[in-house]
Image (cartoon, rainbow, N blue to C red):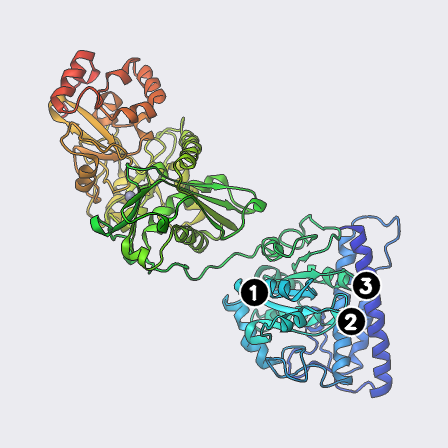
Amino acid sequence: MSKIIASAAIRGAQKIFNKAEKQYEEALEKYGPEQDVGFPNTAYYLPIIYAITGIGVSKIKDMKRVLDTCKKLIPPPVREHMPLPYLAPALDAGMATFFAEEIIEAIRYLEEPDCYAANSEEITEKNKWLGAANDVIFRKRGVEFVDGTAPGFAAIVGAAPDPETASRIAIELQEKNLYVFMCGENQGKRFSEQLIQANVQIGWPTRLVPFGPDIYQAVFAIGFACRVAMAFGGIKPGDFRKNLIYNKDRTYAFVLALGDVTDEWYANAAGAINWGFPTIADTPIPQVLPTGICTYEHVVSNIPHSQIVQKAVEVRGLKVQVSKIPIPVSYGPAFEGERVRGDDIYIEMGGGRTIAVEWTTSKSMDEVEDGKVEIVGPDITDVPSGTRLHFAMIAEVAGRNFQEDFEPILERQNHHLINQAQGVMHIGQRDIAWIRISKQAVEKGFRLEHIGKIIHAKYHQDFGTIFDKVQIKIYTKEEKVREILEKARSVYERRDQRIEGMTDESINTFYSCILCQSFAPNHVCIISPERTGLCGAYNWLDCRAAYEINPEGPNQPVEKGTSIDEKYGQFKGVNEYVTKASRQKVTEVSLYSLMVSPMTTCGCCECIAAILPMANGIMTVDRDYTGMTPCGMKFTTLAGSVGGGAQTPGFLGHSKFNITQKKFLKGDGGLLRIIWMPKRLKEEIYQRLKKRGEELGVPEFPDMIADETVANTEEEVIEYITKKGHPCLTMEPLM
Ligand code: SF4
Ligand code: ZN
């Protein structure tokens, strides 16, 4: 802890203690030791003292013991050469501060019974300070801290520079469902009075609670937290450790210090740290960054008012709750399977005709403003109905505990998250996304921004534990979209490469993915190191990470068990799992074959491979290729007939990356069985294709694969591969 802060906190504690001691002595003389004291209509005496020491102060004479404890707690002033560390003595001084302040407040109630609008939830004509919550208010409000309605509170000390700033900060805190407990003054101004000036309604009902005019009323905030722990958390009075830990773990509270930080403020801030409540200041006081008591930093300073709430939430580790998806159309799983077709389409992005790319990437905490959605380029209403736009969406995620490994997992969610909006259809992922938005949705006010809103809300709802903030950028101008496409592609490539070198033999556990069962009810992907998901977005490592994040989620470990057929890649454990997960629709799958019990295919596949029987070979086509293929079907027709989650021998959905993985179609002769693919796909994977060809002893292999420039029918393919001496010509018959 900073020496400056520690010395100031100790000085502040001493001053407050002196005041309490003096008032106690005067009160003792005036009222006698048997005089009742306390906060009106509360069951917890002076709650901080009671919670921490177990002493129930109900008479003036009880205060003596507490003051004696304070004396022991407050360390001597920090001398020039005091040895480090300063944290522990400052925390003790802070604790003594709260005890002393409770005594001051109890005496105030005695001296001026009407100093607070007692028993009222709202401020009155006569009184704009509410003081300690009585038990009725406390029961009603405190339970919200337990059931999650209110994650915690912001204790605001001092004042904003002006009423407008005060009201902006208050609204931001209210939006986070936090209570705002206010006390103290800065240069004659007080935060709660500023809110009144700005016509903001204050009181318990709006969660903006004006405790009192001075710093001493900070105890009503901390006391509230102590009462919550005792009343709802079952923590016994005097069990200080449990009380502190309960609040650190469950009450997301922090102090916002607005204005000049006095010694007394420092003393209170140091006290709050005991409960894990950090202080965020708008002035350039020294910071206390290293963690220890609080979850993250203890004191963070010099934060502009526009960022102070966001910063506080971040420092306290408060998870953002988004309860409602703020979009103008209905939202939910019921709309996931809905199609947008023909005349209904207002706008279309991707699907082979324009670029559509989605990329989720991580950034540092200060680069991300949570909830921000930025649209660069024409929006839906800037173009006439029937337009096709380019589309690039980057979701920038930041979190203290976020790992790069989580990026593909979040990214893969976009598909079903966006699909759940009524009138919005989403297919695919990565650089083969495809979005259609209906006229009805646009009429209701749906804009591109709402895609970002969905991502923000749903990422938080479903994955809030692994990240803290997300902002979304959507681009629709071709040049910029292309630029992002290039960047994203190099990232996809890097992600794919991570699995390189791992083999199916080297591990005993595969993973399942049933994310696509909402569209293809019996579809199960079994993902092994050498067979990535057919959508191309999930490999074995991703599944493993997804399982770690959510052990109840769609990716489950599958013990492969004994090998039933090595050539086709059939395993006992896999078959058992698939039988269960497909509800007995599929009882046997080969990981490495399209001919014998192939894996099921869903609509997300990057490519579909199909047998060309006369040629004794296999072709494959990727989603971007819209032309006719030698099997007599276009990609869309193929996807329509095999993409429903059924096993279709002779056809198989797979990812682009999978083509060059060693186990690809191993049971059917492997990569060397491939005789046709679109030229662009061949170019895209050329390097890896060449390398695999070399490994298989056919260095000219890529050139032996026909494409649309040389063959469009099976006959033409046969002609071409015969000319090239393609290895499949001498392989055993496929059928
Ligand atoms: Fe999961 Fe397979 Fe769907 Fe990809 S295609 S999301 S791996 S079920
Ligand atoms: Zn799918």
For residue 12, the mark is: 3
Classify mark 3: residues with Cα within 10 Å, few (<14), some (14-19) or many (20+).
many
Residue 463 x %, y %: 45, 51
The residue at label 1 has a CB less than 8 Å from ligand 1: no
> In whole angstroms, how far apart are the C-alphas of marks 1 and 3?
31 Å
> In whole angstroms, how far apart are the C-alphas of marks 2 and 1?
32 Å
Residue 216 x %, y %: 74, 71
* Number of dots carrying numbers: 3
Q: Amino acid at mark 3?
A: Gly
Q: Quadrant of residue 595?
A: top left
N-terminal-most mark, 1 or 3: 3
Circle 2 residue = 100
Residue 293 is left or right of residue 691, and the answer is: right
N-terminal-most mark, 2 or 3: 3
For residue 188, the mark is: none
The residue at label 2 has a CB less than 8 Å from ligand 1: no
Residue 271 is left or right of residue 558, and the answer is: right
Residue 133 x %, y %: 63, 77
Q: Residue at x 51, y 57 (%)?
A: 320
Quick one: 395 or 226, which is closer to the camera?
395
